[in-house]
């Protein structure tokens, strides 16, 4: 502080005004009075994201056997073909409706969409477990994806339920819960599917679970959905339901939306970007980065299992399915630890932009280390691939969470759920394309083991690194744009400038 003069605040502090009967103002008042971390609300967000992931993550361990028992595939080789359409139906349903659900959440509130989505997941997941025809399995999974539109609104809700200094923690919960779902879901599906065959002393062949061998895991997950559905009744709404005049809105939303200790990050958003999300380049550029990273991650996920389980003579590791499962479980557990204890501190110091630069650079370099792992013998190959997998997943989840921060800070509250829904829609289309493309490239690379330039699987990881390079370039200006002062988080005695 020079010359004894007080430091000039970055933004003019204005008195908070709360409207009686407005649920959004009630949440803002609570945030103003309680500057600590809202653990209760964070736990609710975490459990909702987890339960929304279980219906899709639980089916992969038994999907092969389910398609076989539905007798739709004429040969064993055709099972994978039909199984792919079942998984794609969920992604397609989510892609077609996520933006619409976001618009609904911006109109009537986050809570109704979240509660309705959980209820439909509860209902249609039971019907999926009772499927006796292939069309029924596809239809119910499509309905789970299309009607469960809470992914976009819950991201918006995570931002709105806490103070700005807690935004990194809030959005990291989304990735953490999803990672746990990738562990819990397959465990439920793997252990509880076909119970009459696995536990004949408990479940008889002529019982309900014997006639519907894939009903038990779906029933357990629906039971979990029901518990979360009941708890969501007490979920506080964050959307403001009062009208603000244009002068108030253009000057600053802090008079209604923020406490006197929180500065409005939305004040730099122009009226043009408020009207049309597609013209909001800070939003669209972060969504494009999000799609690039998700495309690369989905392709990597598809290739990793194929590469690890393929024979060493084809450039693989000759891993068993149990070995691959162990690697994925360790990676999932590492994401939980990283997102909970490490990521918030990193992004608080470096900010989302610089954090994305570093994560994308390291992820690209890391991909070139996979092919040499095949020359290692056990147990060194297992150790090396576990370390590589942990780092790769950490880098991906870092960039994705940074994208969440950029997206939610690029729009005002009345468009936040729509923006997250739009991001989910575009991401789902990219994720639908990635597995097919990755499978084709991997099959082609297997036939080119003696090529001069990046033989065999080296070419696969080289192409993945090229996609990572595109993502890295996109993290710089002018491609990735963001509003000035978006990441200024003010506390009484401290200002973080990310």
Image (tube, rainbow, N blue to C red):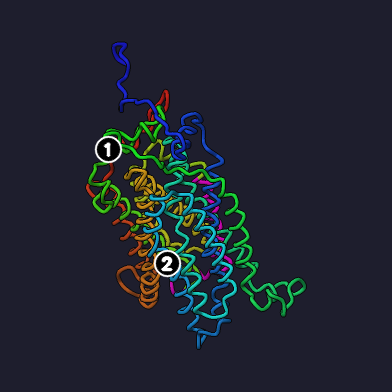
Q: Residue furthest right?
A: 201
- How many other residues sit within 10 Å of disc 2, few (<14), some (14-19) or many (≥20)? many
Compared to residue 144, the image places residue 281 above or below, namely above
- For the N terminus, give its image quadrant: top left
Picture quadrant of residue 354: top left
Disc 1: which residue: 246
Q: Is residue 453 visible?
A: yes
Which mark is in front, 1 or 2?
Answer: 1
Residue at horizontal 48%, vertical 83%?
Answer: 78
Asked whether 80 falls inside the magenta stretch, the response is no
Q: Please indicate whether residue 66 sits to the left or right of residue 256 in the image.
A: right
**Where does the magenta region start and end?**
313-339
Per the image, label 1 sits on a secondary structure element best described as: helix
Count neighbours of disc 1 (C-alpha within 10 A) and say few if under 14, some if 14 to 19, many if 20 or more. Answer: few
Q: Earlier in the sequence, mark 1 or mark 2?
A: 2
Q: What residue sits right under mark 2 in the picture?
A: 93
Residue occupying image coordinates x 50% and y 58%: 117
Q: Are marks 1 and 2 in contact (CB under 8 Å)?
A: no
Mark 1 to mark 2 CA distance (whole Å):
37 Å
Seen in the image, is 15 located left or right of residue 376?
A: left
Residue 363 drawn at (x, y percent): 38, 53
Q: Position of residue 442 (x, y in %)?
A: 39, 72
């Amino acid at each position: 502080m020079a010359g004894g003069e007080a430091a000039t605040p970055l933004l003019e502090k204005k008195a908070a005004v709360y409207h009686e009967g407005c649920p959004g103002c009630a949440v803002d008042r609570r945030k103003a009075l309680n500057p600590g971390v809202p653990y209760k609300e964070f736990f609710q967000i975490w459990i909702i994201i987890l339960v929304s992931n279980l219906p899709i993550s639980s089916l992969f361990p038994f999907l092969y056997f389910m398609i076989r028992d539905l007798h739709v595939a004429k040969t064993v080789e055709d099972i994978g073909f039909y199984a792919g359409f079942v998984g794609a139906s969920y992604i397609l349903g989510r892609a077609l409706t996520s933006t619409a659900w976001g618009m609904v959440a911006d109109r009537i509130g986050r809570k109704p969409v979240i509660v309705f989505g959980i209820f439909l997941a509860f209902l249609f997941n039971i019907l999926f477990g009772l499927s006796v025809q292939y069309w029924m399995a596809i239809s119910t999974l499509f309905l789970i994806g299309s009607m469960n539109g809470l992914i976009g609104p819950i991201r918006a809700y995570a931002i709105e339920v806490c103070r700005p200094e807690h935004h990194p923690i809030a959005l990291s919960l989304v990735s953490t819960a999803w990672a746990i779902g990738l562990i819990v879901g397959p465990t439920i599906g793997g252990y509880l599917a076909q119970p009459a065959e696995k536990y004949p002393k408990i479940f008889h062949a002529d019982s309900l679970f014997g006639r519907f061998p894939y009903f038990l895991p779906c029933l357990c997950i629906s039971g979990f959905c029901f518990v979360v559905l009941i708890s969501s009744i007490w979920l506080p709404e964050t959307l403001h339901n009062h009208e603000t005049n244009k002068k108030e809105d253009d000057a600053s939303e802090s008079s209604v939306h923020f406490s006197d200790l929180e500065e409005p990050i939305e004040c730099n958003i122009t009226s043009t970007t408020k009207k049309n999300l597609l013209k909001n380049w800070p939003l669209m550029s972060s969504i494009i980065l999000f799609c690039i990273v998700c495309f690369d991650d989905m392709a990597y996920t598809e290739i990793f299992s194929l590469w690890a389980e393929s024979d060493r003579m084809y450039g693989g590791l000759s891993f068993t399915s149990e070995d691959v499962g162990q690697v994925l479980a360790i990676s999932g557990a590492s994401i939980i630890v990283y997102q909970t204890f490490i990521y918030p501190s990193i992004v608080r110091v470096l900010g989302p932009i610089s954090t994305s630069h570093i994560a994308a650079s390291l992820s690209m370099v890391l991909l070139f280390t996979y092919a040499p792992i095949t020359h290692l013998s056990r147990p060194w190959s297992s150790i090396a691939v576990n370390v590589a997998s942990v780092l790769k997943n950490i880098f991906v989840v870092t960039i994705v969470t940074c994208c969440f921060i950029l997206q939610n800070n690029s729009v005002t509250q009345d468009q936040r759920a729509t923006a997250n829904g739009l991001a989910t829609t575009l991401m789902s289309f990219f994720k639908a394309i990635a597995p097919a493309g990755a499978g084709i490239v991997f099959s082609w690379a297997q036939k080119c083991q003696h090529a001069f330039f990046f033989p065999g699987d080296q070419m696969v990881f080289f192409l993945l690194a090229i996609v990572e390079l595109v993502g890295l370039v996109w993290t710089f200006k002018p491609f990735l744009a963001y509003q000035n002062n978006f990441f200024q988080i003010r506390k009484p005695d401290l200002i973080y400038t990310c």
